[in-house]
Image: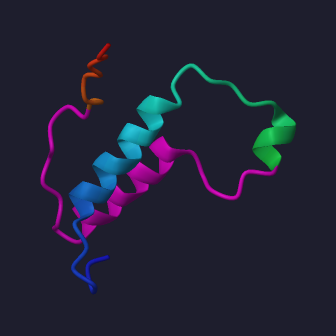
Amino acid sequence: MKANKYDVVGAYTAFKKLGLLSEGSTQTNFEKMFNSHPDSNKRAEAIKKKAEKDGLWKDPGTVSLPAVRLTK
């Protein structure tokens, strides 16, 4: 990501939000076995760790989902 000038903090917050969206859901061991990607929170933490190592980390603060406004 560093070589291609990706926004590492943006990638981190995106995966954290995906993790928030999946909170409370559970998967069976069978479903976990066939997942092609790691858990979103684990991916976010891996990005953060690498960004810290590369000196690119800027703490975004608390990551949360936007409020949903229902219209009639």
- Residue 66 at what x, y percent from top left? 25, 29
Depicted 65 relative to depicted 44: above or below: above
Q: Residue at x 30, y 30 (%)?
A: 65
Q: Is residue 37 left or right of residue 66?
A: right
Q: Is residue 40 magenta?
A: yes
- Residue 64 at what x, y percent from top left? 27, 30
The quadrant of the picture occupied by the N terminus is bottom left
Residues shaded magenta = 34-63
Residue that extends furthest to the right in the rendered view of this protein = 30
- Residue 48 at what x, y percent from top left? 31, 55
Q: Residue at x 37, y 39 (%)?
A: 17
Give the tally of numbered discs: 0
Residue that extends furthest to the front in the rendered view of this protein = 72
Depicted 36 relative to depicted 6: above or below: above
Q: Residue at x 16, y 68 (%)?
A: 55
- Based on the displayed image, in which of its 4 quarters is residue 29 positioned? top right
- Based on the displayed image, in which of its 4 quarters is residue 68 positioned? top left
